[in-house]
Image (cartoon, rainbow, N blue to C red):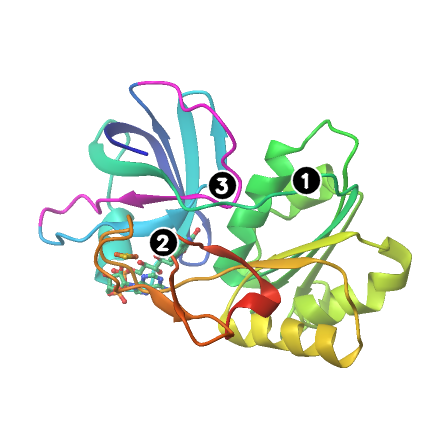
Amino acid sequence: MKELQVRILENVPLAAGIYKMRFALPEKLDGAFCGKFVNISVGDGAHLLRRPIAICDCSGDTVTICYQIKGDGTRAMSKVEAGDTLSCVLPLGNGFSVGQAKRVALVGGGVGIFPMISVLREFAGTDKKFFSYMGFRNASAVCMEETFAALSERSKIVTDDGSFGEKATAVSAFLADLSAAKPDLILSCGPVPMLRALKNELRDRNINIPCYVSLEERMGCGIGACLVCVCKKSGGENARVCKDGPVFKIGEVEI
Ligand SMILES: Cc1cc2nc3c(=O)[nH]c(=O)nc-3n(C[C@H](O)[C@H](O)[C@H](O)COP(=O)(O)OP(=O)(O)OC[C@H]3O[C@@H](n4cnc5c(N)ncnc54)[C@H](O)[C@@H]3O)c2cc1C
Ligand code: FES
């Protein structure tokens, strides 16, 4: 993990209220990146806290993140221009591990689709097969569908209102395809109601495929020191999403 001054190469809209930012690092980043995140300053000088954003892609010294405008911080980020520099701490968190799995189901919703892209990018060209089920609010929020289609064995994009693809949720699309895809691993990231639905469905249907979820929590330091990001483990003990996560086994944490 390093604190670096990164140079913005591109910061452009991808879909309604969603931006893609690409930046250059002053040095190469080695090792796995999927499911890890950056903690990046927002560039306006007024917000002291950095914002945690998943790494979408990392190739050598270039990193791509994608973010939705939520509040003041991400709105300030959207004003950053190519050529500007920002302070960024990376890579953070434990990330996804795919291990020996050969057939991996990716279940993503909203901004949770971006860490799913990082898994596809990291394992592109290997013998692993990916089955992607991505859910969006409506057609105006849909993005990166070509990337999912290109890097997955099968990709389903669904929306809450049916304005793009089927009217379904990422979880229901995944369940409908489960017996055909036959995954030996499930990775997921998305809003809490989506993760909760996934957890309940797996339990109620007695599906015992290993499943890991990436959690989002409000963060302060991003490095395990301030305890702002604590979540509850199933046994009652606390875990720091930034340092012990953000990826947890689905049964290990309260969702
Ligand atoms: C590990 C991780 C990965 C993430 N990856 C992405 C991503 O790839 N794309 C994306 O659009 N968003 C992502 N988020 C959520 C993103 O960090 C928040 O939307 C963002 O911090 C909101 O900042 P804001 O100033 O615009 O909003 P405000 O609500 O004004 O933020 C106020 C404060 O709350 C914190 N905060 C608010 N919402 C969240 C949240 N959901 N998670 C964490 N901190 C929050 C902010 O950091 C800030 O300190 C991720 C969050 C985490 C924890
Ligand atoms: S954000 Fe400070 S401990 Fe996790």
Residue 12 placement: quadrant = top left
Q: Could you tell me the amino acid type at mark 3?
A: Cys
Q: Is mark 2 within 8 Å of ligand 2?
A: yes
What is the x, y in percent for residue 25?
32, 24
* Residue, disc 3: 56
Provide the secondary structure element on which disc 1 rests: loop
- Residue 33 as seen in the image, left or right of residue 177: left
At 52% from the left and 62% from the top, the residue drawn is 110
At 79% from the left and 31% from the top, the residue drawn is 127
Q: Is residue 161 visible?
A: no
* Residue, disc 2: 242
At 57% from the left and 57% from the top, the residue drawn is 142
Which SS does the magenta portion mostly show? loop
- Whole-number angstrom distance, CA of label 1 to CA of label 3: 20 Å
Provide the secondary structure element on which disc 2 rests: loop
The magenta segment: 27-45
Residue 147 placement: quadrant = top right
Magenta stretch containing residue 54, yes or no? no
What is the x, y in percent for residue 180?
90, 57
Foreground mark, 1 or 3, reads 1
Residue 120 placement: quadrant = top right
- Whole-number angstrom distance, CA of label 2 to CA of label 1: 22 Å
Please give the label number shown on residue 99.
1
Foreground mark, 3 or 2, reads 2
Q: Is mark 3 within 8 Å of ligand 1?
A: yes
Q: Could you tell me the amino acid type at mark 1?
A: Gly
Mark 2, other Cα within 10 Å: few <14 / some 14–19 / many ≥20: many
Q: Of callouts 3 and 2, which one flags the residue occurring earlier in the amino acid sequence?
A: 3
Q: Of callouts 2 and 1, which one flags the residue occurring earlier in the amino acid sequence?
A: 1
Magenta stretch containing residue 30, yes or no? yes
